[in-house]
Image (cartoon, rainbow, N blue to C red):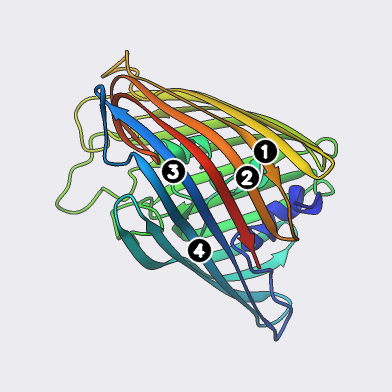
Amino acid sequence: MSTKCLSAAILIGCAIASSGARAADPGQTTVGGRAFIDVTSIDETSNGKKTDASGLGIDVKRFYIAIDHGFDKTWNANITTDFNYVSADSETQLFVKKAYVEAKFAKAFNMRIGSSDVPLVPYVEGLYGNRYIENVIVERLSLEASADWGIHTTGAFFGDHMHYALDAISGAGYKNPTRSESLDYDGRLDFEPIGGLTIALFYRTGHRGLDKQSVTTLHTADRSEVLLAWVKPKYKIGVEYFQADNWNQVLSPLSDSADGYSIWAGFEVKKVSLFARYDDANPSKDLAPPLKNKYYNFGVTLHPVQKVDVSFVYKQDKVQNGTYKTTNGTITNGTHDELGVWIQVSY
């Protein structure tokens, strides 16, 4: 990952590059892609018993194909498809993740209309760098999708030291282009006072696309996060903290809240990258206070050829005192332990 993509370009240009295609020059069309592949052994227990997710397997969890066309210096369009197959549940699907028209009016104001990156997940992924191994904490806990349908605006100020993203979105995620009574509002303000140091604030509020003519919403879902990261070509460290209110209670008369933090770090020695991460979350502070989710991973990444990353990783996702669903599955008083090789291929 270049240092250029860790600056203002994360905001304006690298959202396209994150799925493989670069922004096309006027009159040109570019095609790119990215694949996430793993070969792992899983040992998963729930209520003291092994689940069917346990065993050896190969997963192609993501396969993006991104096409970008530049009409002129201002206008371009992008469509990004995603192939998804998970051997554990025999799921196979091809779907559109991003489809938008973009207008780059000025450095301080760019706009996309359609399905595009939301302010939080792809931005943090650009700093974290290990999305192919594990989602960032709010996505891992199903508290955010990485893209959504709506109007997306971005911009940079003060010599690219300060950036913003402000979206008006459907709220239901890119897989569900639903129509509802109101939109969700999602934003980010980030500041890079010196090269490599990032301070970012995130906030989202709305009804997550659930407020319809025949449905009465009883709560508004809110989520905030603060991020502090120090990222250089040879090392990185980041800390995230989030707070969510009524995320899963929009239609329920009962209130609930969640919070948690994630700490991740990595450094490179002679073209070999060592990394580790730890998450700690309280998914239901009001309705199920004892419920806890803890996650960690550590490993080493090799770069055998350009645009190919091969990581040897061990990770554990643990649920205590109840039941909770993360991207690793639904677990009741148990753990999801996984050991193997994760591969990222870009073109």
Residue to which mark 4 is pinned: 63
Residue to which mark 2 is pinned: 311
Residue to which mark 1 is pinned: 300
Dot 2, crowdedness within 10 Å: few (<14), some or many (≥20)?
many
Classify 275 as above or below 33: above
Residue to which mark 3 is pinned: 144
Find residue 245 and report its horizontal and vertical position in percent: 38, 28
In the displayed orientation, state which residue is furthest to the front.
Answer: 56
- Label 2: state its secondary structure: strand
Along the polypeptide, which appears first: circle 2 or circle 1? 1
Along the polypeptide, which appears first: circle 3 or circle 1? 3
Classify 170 as above or below 75: above
User: The C terminus lies in which quarter of the figure?
Assistant: bottom right
Q: Nearer the viewer, mark 2 or mark 3?
A: 2
Q: Nearer the viewer, residue 344 or 130?
A: 344
Residue visible at 32% across and 13% down?
290
Q: Within the image, what quadrant is residue 287 found in? A: top left
Cβ–Cβ under 8 Å for marks 2 and 1: yes
